[in-house]
Amino acid sequence: MLYGSIRCASVRRFIVALLREALVLNAVIMPVIGLVLFFSAGVIAQDRIVKKSADSRGKVVYRYGSDDSWSPVKKRLLKLLNDYRDHRIGVSLINLSSNREVYAFNANSPLEPASIMKIITSAVALKTLSPHFRFKTDFVVDKFENGRVNKMYVIGSGDPVLTVDSLWMIARKFASRGIRSIETLALDTSMHQDKVSRQGQRAFEAGTSALALNFNSVGFEVCPAAVGQRASVKRDPPEYPVVLKGSIITNSRNRSKFYIDELSRGDSWPQVYRLRGSISRYQECETIYRSVSNPERYFAEVFVGLLKSEGVRVGEVVFNGRAPESGRVLYSHK
């Protein structure tokens, strides 16, 4: 098993190199070895097994400890540690047959797990849900006749691939089926009772939701203009209303430094952002993503806007709706 976190491109290369070594040793060693790796940016500290010293040119290196009979896998791991000695790394090598730790380096150092936790999450999901499981978002109607839907329920289950593109295709599909009006659009998020609130404004700090459109994030595309002029800032999706204050100015240097910071607090709506800094006239357009404060309202605003663009009128929107068991599934997104 492989656990850890990726904080920069060079650490990703470390993982690739480690996996390459693991494949070479797989036939003999890996059936009985479990690897627990933890990564983050920083400097490797001295460990009880690896000796930190300097070579004749003053370059920091890690050498074998005198109290260990080094196996080929340990030597390969040590080489990788030397290649990435400018990063803080923790390694724990465990014999799965005896449950004994045979190699450790910074094994007890607290490190931020970050992105490589996805491997653990994926392993648990595959075991618990099976490889054939699919999250789905059901669109259920109670009555549909003469182009009019009385109530449409959107039943969310945390579908991770529900994007604006897919929602637009759904809106087009409903219009092509003759739907011209939806009197009530009700969002059923009852499958997610224990939601995790967002932790900050950055996209990866978004909270959880049964209706997680675009990973519960909104994008801002920043494009340079003429020198001294305001840069263009466009939100994506455009159906989601936000308030932008301030500006990002186009400079003549080959350097950009700009910020898009949220000013609003909690679940307030619409979200307010402050623009500041400058972008180089030579830079290509760059998209910055920010988490949304209210995922359900985000979904509703975008979906209603997409339906409207396809000629479908929506009356009222009801949050915390509950779909009836007798409803007809008009479409299921998986």
Image (spheres, rainbow, N blue to C red):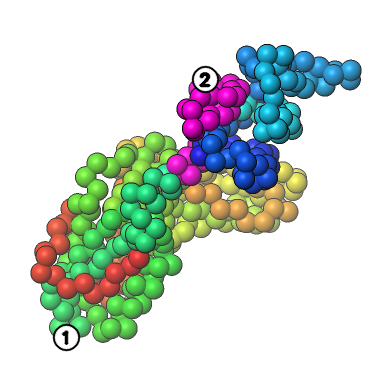
Q: Which mark is residue 238?
A: none
Query: Looking at the picture, which amino acid does disc 1 mark?
Result: Asn
Q: Secondary structure at mark 1?
A: loop
- Residues drawn in magenta: 91-120
Residue drawn 20% across the image and 83% down it: 147
Residue drawn 22% across the image and 52% down it: 191
Q: Position of residue 151 (x, y in %)?
A: 15, 69
**Label 1, residues with CA under 10 Å away: few <14, some 14-19, many ≥20:** few
Q: Position of residue 244 (x, y in %)?
A: 45, 48
Q: Secondary structure at mark 2?
A: loop
Badge 1 is on which residue? 146
Q: Is residue 82 above or below residue 14?
A: above
Say if mark 2 contacts mark 1, CB within 8 Å: no
Q: In this orientation, which residue lies closer to the viewer: 111 or 108?
A: 108
Q: Position of residue 157 (x, y in %)?
A: 28, 56
Res 38 seen here: no
* Quadrant of the rendered image containing residue 173: bottom left
Left or right? Give the position of 308 relative to 47.
left
Badge 2 is on which residue? 108
Res 223 seen here: yes
Q: Is residue 57 magenta?
A: no
Query: Looking at the picture, which amino acid does disc 2 mark?
Result: Asn
**Label 2, residues with CA under 10 Å away: few <14, some 14-19, many ≥20:** few
* Quadrant of the rendered image containing residue 171: bottom left
